[in-house]
Image (cartoon, rainbow, N blue to C red):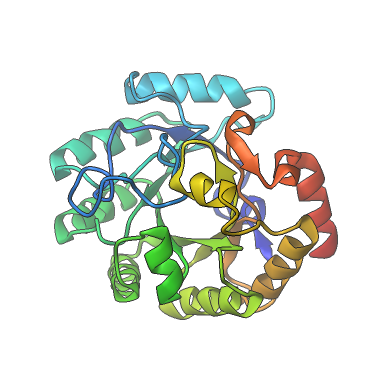
Amino acid sequence: MYKTLNEHYREKFGCKVYKLSLDAGLTCPNRDGTLGVGGCIFCSGSGSGEFAEGPCADIRTQLERAKTRVAEKNRSGKYIAYFQSFTNTYAPVEKLRKLYFDAIEPEEIVGLAIGTRPDCLGDDVITLLEEVNRIKPVSVELGLQTIHPESVRYIRRGYENEVYFDAVKHLKTANIDVVTHMILGLPGETPQMAIETTRAAVEAGTDGVKFHLLHVLQGTDLAADYLAGKFSCLTLEEYGLWLKCCIEILPQHIVVHRITGDGAKKDLIAPAWSGDKKRVINYLNCILR
């Protein structure tokens, strides 16, 4: 029904490939006072990098630690270095150059994935990404989440939709693959609104999508609203319906990198069902056949 990330990696690299989540020790303009200080309303203290290695270690050490975590599962020995936490193009370009080249230096690293904001992609950064992409494939993950103005304001995203569309255009011109993050179940949104966000990402030219369930983590401003009864989370069945509607409109070439998102169990407030990842994935795979 859709192209999975595993299928995409096997086509591209000829084997199964695992992502190694890294922390570059950077921050975000939505946290350091440039745009705001609290970050997006759903963002945790780790900048959505709950499963990344700690920033206290250098990149090579982080890679080795992350490899140890998945060593028993990864028989191919090939990996993608994934800068996940916070905004990984938000630094002087020479600092980024060292981070990126340190990450791709090991032979077993076959590609680089970079999570960032579309408003943090200056011409100098895109030129650097082009340079790295000539050595090993680069993909850039952009947090769109939604295109609907009320939701954009509520989550405190901090940029207009046109900034996303412009970033995708510039990245595609530079021959950089783009992956778009979307959140299903934002307060006040409907399945049709989620479909409209998905369609907008497709029309913009994204190469892949990551669908995330709206989940509530301790320490976020979203948690305060949830505990005050301002919204409720989707049930598993509702989420499955929303997800299926969105995936059905995707062209066959677009890679689905993720069909749900989950935070660390110790920080999860709601929905409780999302903590049982194996059950959730099995259910979603069943209804998406």
Residue 245 to residue 99: above or below: below
Residue 174 x, y percent position in the rendering: 28, 65
Q: Quadrant of the C terminus?
A: bottom right
The picture places residue 107, in percent across and down from the top left corner, at 43, 31
Does the rendering let one see residue 249?
Answer: yes
Find residue 92 and report its horizontal and vertical position in percent: 14, 43
Location of residue 210 (image quadrant): bottom right
Q: Is residue 113 above or below residue 1?
A: above
Residue located farthest toward the front when viewing the structure as drawn: 228
Query: In the rendered view, does 156 fall on the left or right side of 192?
Result: left
Identify which residue is drawn at 33% across, 52% down: 133
Q: Position of residue 170 (x, y in %)?
A: 27, 69
Nearest the eye: 172 or 12: 172
Residue 34 versus residue 120: which sits nearer the camera? 34
Q: Is residue 289 visible?
A: no
Image quadrant holding the N terminus, namely: bottom right
The vertical placement of 183 against 92, above or below, is: below
Q: Quadrant of residue 26?
A: top left
Q: Nearer the viewer, residue 73 or 239?
A: 239
The residue that appears at 53% across and 36% down in the rendered structure is: 218
Q: Residue at x 71, y 62 (%)?
A: 239
